[in-house]
Structure formats: C-alpha cells, structure tokens
Image (spheres, rainbow, N blue to C red):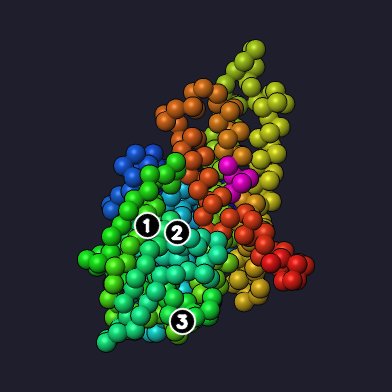
Amino acid sequence: MIDPLLPPDTAEFARAVRDFAQAELRPRYQEHDRVGRLDDKVLKLVADMGLLGLRAPESLGGQGADCVTIGVVAEEVGRADFNIGYLINNTALVTEVLLNSGTDDQQRQFIPPITRGELVPALCLSEPEHGSDAAALETRATPTDGGWVLSGEKTSITFGMQAGAGLVFARTGPGRAKGITAFYVDLNHESITRSEFHDLGGRAIGRAALHFDDTFVPGDRLIGPVGGGFTQVMKGFEFARAIISLVCIGAASASIDEALQHARDRKAFGQPIGKFQGVAFPLVEHATHLAAARLLALRALQLKDRGLDHRVEANMAKSWAPRLAVQAAHDALLVFGHSAYSDEYPLGQRIRDLIGLELGDGTANITKLVVARELLGRQFAT
C-alpha cells in the first residue's frame, strides 16, 4: 500500500510507478538475470517514465524530484525489479555529483543523455586494494596538454560492462582524501578494457573491473576542483545509502507479500497454512521490521530535503536494511517450500541480488563506523 501520509503528488506518482513497474518491469526481472544485462528497450521505457532523471531539474530533462520522492519511487521499482531499482539509485547519485560540482556547461552536456536513457553512467571509485578505504586509492591522473591521463584499475564497478560513461575518481596529489579528483570519462575509449565478474547475484547490473591504460581525458571533463573529488562523492553516498535501503525493502516486501498470499492459499492438515503461528508470526515480524526500516530511510531523505545532516539516519538504514531484507526474503522462500527452490519463482533471485547490497556502497561495518563517529566522537571510531 502506498503510504497515505505522503504528499498527494508524491503518492499519485508512486501509484503510477507501481503500476508501470508491475506491468513492464516485473515480467522481465528473471530474464535480465539470465542474459546478464538490462535490455535497452526496457531502459527506454524506464527513461520515458521519468525514472532516470528524478534528481535532474526539468531544464535538463528531469523531474526535479525531492529525495523522498526518489526513495519512494526506488522502493516501488525495487519491488518489481531489484536491479532497475539500483539503476535509479545509481543515476540519482551520479546526477547529484554533477549537479553539485559540475559547471552549467557540463550539466547540459552530461545529464540529458542519462535522463533519456541513452547512456548508463557508472561511479568508479573502488580499487582492488582499496574498497572500504577509498581515500587511499591509487589510480592516477597526470596533467598533460589539453587534459589529463588516467592510469590504474577500478574494480567492483556496478554497470561496468554496460556503462557508457563513468564518474572516475583518481589521485592528483599527495595525501589521502584531499589528493583525489573527479573526472567524467567516456568508457568506450580504446585505452579502457573491461573485465566482467560472474557474480552470485546482481547479474543484470554487470559488475566489472575497468583498466585505464594512459587514458586521455579532456580538461573540460574535470568535475569540480582539483582535490575535491572525495568530498563530492561522500556527500552523495549519504543520501544514496538511504535510497539503496528502500530498494532492498521493496524487494523484500515483494517476497513477504508473495509468502502471505501463499499462506492464504496453501492448505495443510485441512486449513490454510497461514493459520499456523509458525508460518504467520515470522512473516508478521518481517513486515514489522521492514516498516520500521522504511521509516528510518525516509527520515534520512526528509532531512536531506531540508538541508539537514542526515548521515546518522542514512548509515543506520544502510547497515540494517540489506541484512534485514535478505533474512525476510529467505524466510519468505521457506514458506513456499521446495516449489520456490527453483528459478520458476523469483524468490531465490531476490536473495542473491539482495546479498550484493550487504557488500556494496558501504558494508554494514563501514556504515556503523560512520554512525559511531557521530554518536561517540571521531576519536572513538578510528
């Protein structure tokens, strides 16, 4: 049910997105997993619905939506297709960085192709030896005539096999965070090679390693000031972690809804299995926890919309929601029994996909570390 306390315009849009997602995205969810990529025709449908330009202003072909609306929409899409829900988060995050740090010309050049679904963007931060400790990255950008030369490797890049452009973070100076700069890079450049990962889940989003072999990047693709890249992406990560939480909650809620329906329909010992407390109570507990996690994530986005500090709430949500979602989806599968232990149903795929967000975009320990620094003081969480 769409939250009746949402603003009327947001609730109306959410209902339209739910109808669209259930009709157009859910039937393709398992097929995308089998082929290992998102279909271009589906991406066009998603773009035409306005879902790839939620964060962008109308002047750039977007919706100009607030963060709460983006979160609600991402949850509804995640309920139908987890991986497209993650795409919505990904485009919102890249757009957020471009809006906060890019010039007017850069925004006009880079954002509209994203909103139209012509180009999938990637955020290229993690490296083989530097995942959680992103401030220690080693990919280097060296100044040259007319621009920069990138050398190094990025790994665990979501949409790395399908993305046409990437927001790449590279070292331009000494030290840690203050030596990192952002560039918007054409990932089809001949000097870039891609190595696909064969993952347990999230197969449709094509995680990959990207190798930059003296890749020339024009000077007009420098995003923000030299040395300002790390701060840019960290600010974006905070609200993105709340959106990711809602995508996970949407996928888990779909599994719980399916299990509840099965508990109404399936009979054992002469009555619906939903009458047995051993079946009903775990589903009630998961529905309760998902509702609480949803409120926490939405609170983070409300704070963001008001220009207030939302780090604690966003990181609390990210440390909790993916783990909670995996547990809920797993117990929903158990309600079905052996019939769901096959690819005939999407429940197993949801579990595989959800596990990836226990790892990506901030592990539970990293997000707890952020919260600990805020609650205890930085000296207690080093």
Does the magenta run of residues contain 317?
no
Distance in Å between CA atoms under marks 1 and 2: 9 Å
Q: Which mark is residue 173?
A: 3
**Along the viewing direction, whichever of 212 and 164 lies nearer the viewer:** 212
Distance in Å between CA atoms under marks 3 and 2: 20 Å
Per the image, the residue denoted by label 1 is 209
**Along the viewing direction, whichever of 140 and 227 lies nearer the viewer:** 140
* Residue 35 location, quadrant: top left
**Along the viewing direction, whichever of 306 and 372 lies nearer the viewer:** 372
Per the image, the residue denoted by label 2 is 128
> Is residue 375 positioned above or below 333 on the image?
below
Q: Which residues are magenta?
A: 322-326
Would you say 324 lies left or right of 194 here?
Answer: right
Spot the residue most to the right. 376
> Callout 1: few (<14), some (14-19), or many (20+) C-alpha neighbours within 10 Å?
many
Mark 2 belongs to which amino acid? Pro
Which secondary structure lies at badge 2? loop
* Sequence-first tag of 3 and 1: 3
Which secondary structure lies at badge 1? strand
Which secondary structure lies at badge 3? loop
Mark 3 belongs to which amino acid? Gly
Mark 1 belongs to which amino acid? Ala
Q: Are marks 1 and 2 in contact (CB under 8 Å)?
A: yes
* Sequence-first tag of 3 and 2: 2
* Sequence-first tag of 1 and 2: 2
Q: Residue at x 63, y 75 (%)?
A: 306
Q: Is residue 370 shown to the viewer in this render?
A: yes
